[in-house]
Amino acid sequence: MAMLNSVVAVYGKHLEADRAVKELQRGGIDLHAVSIIGRGTHTDEQAVGYYNLGDRMKHWGTLGALWGGFWGLLFGSAFFMLPGLGPVLAAGPVVAWIVAALESAVVVGGAGALGAGLYGIGIPKDSVVRYETAVKTDHYVLVVHGTAVQVAAAKEILDATHATHVALHAGEVLAA
């Protein structure tokens, strides 16, 4: 049996989230286990869009360079128009969690697809609301999941960054 654990960090600025991902990479954290979620609303009347060709995703807009960096480092990428949150960009395993929630029409205590995806990996309902609110208020939510040892190592790195919030969440026991 394996335990799914997560550490979640919230960042108020895109550069802080970008630096955190780079610190995780420098610290030897497997970026296949890292996700980032944020809103894609800051367009300043520029063309906004994205495409995915193979493993590379391209995004245009004011924060296009930031998201382009995430797309290059993290695995999996998507743009969602989520009720209550609006346009949301996501990269990493969280994309599959959100899609699974959308496909199964799961709603967890009033949480939307993003919340249901986070809840599905063991993040408690009260924390899910906190992270949905963070995204809604233009913050960036970074998630690292894995074994207790992997997540503890990631938390140590994230604690040294400029996160407004860092929390460790123990998930449910999964069949191996």
Image (cartoon, helix red, strand yellow):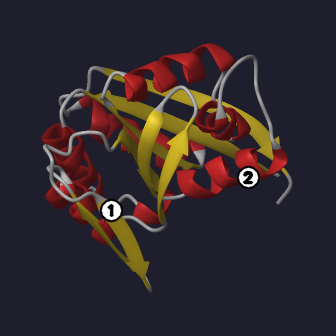
Q: Residue at x 80, y 37 (%)?
A: 106
Which residue is located at x 13 percent, y 43 percent? 44
Which of these two is toward me, 154 or 42?
42
Query: Does dot 2 land on a helix, a strand or a loop?
Result: helix
- Tell me, yes or no, if residue 166 can be seen here: no
Which residue carries the number 2 mark?
A: 100
Residue drawn where x is 21% and y is 51% of the image? 23
Can you tell which mark lies on residue 33?
none
- Mark 1 or 2 closer to N-term? 1
Q: Amino acid at mark 1?
A: Gly
What residue is pinned by disc 1?
49
> From the viewer's perspective, is 144 left or right of 106?
left
Instruction: Give the distance between the C-alpha atoms of the residues marked 1 and 2, in whole angstroms.
Output: 23 Å
133 relative to 176 in the view: left or right? left
Is the residue marked by circle 2 packed among few (<14), some (14-19), or many (20+) residues within 10 Å? Answer: some
Above or below — where is 116 with respect to 77? above
Residue sitting at x 54%, y 25%: 84
Outermost residue, bottom direction? 54
Q: Residues within 10 Å of mark 1 (few under 14, many from 20)?
A: few
Q: Quadrant of residue 88?
A: top left
> Is the residue 105 above or below the residue 146 in the image?
above
Residue 131's spot in the image, x, y percent? Answer: 48, 25
Residue 133 image position (x, y, % from top left): 45, 19
Furthest residue toward front: 45
Q: Quadrant of residue 110?
A: top right
The one nearer the camera, 77 or 151, is 77
Q: 98 above or below 58?
A: above
Taking the image as drawn, is residue 97 in sight?
A: yes
Q: Amino acid at mark 2?
A: Ala
Quadrant the C terminus occupies? bottom right
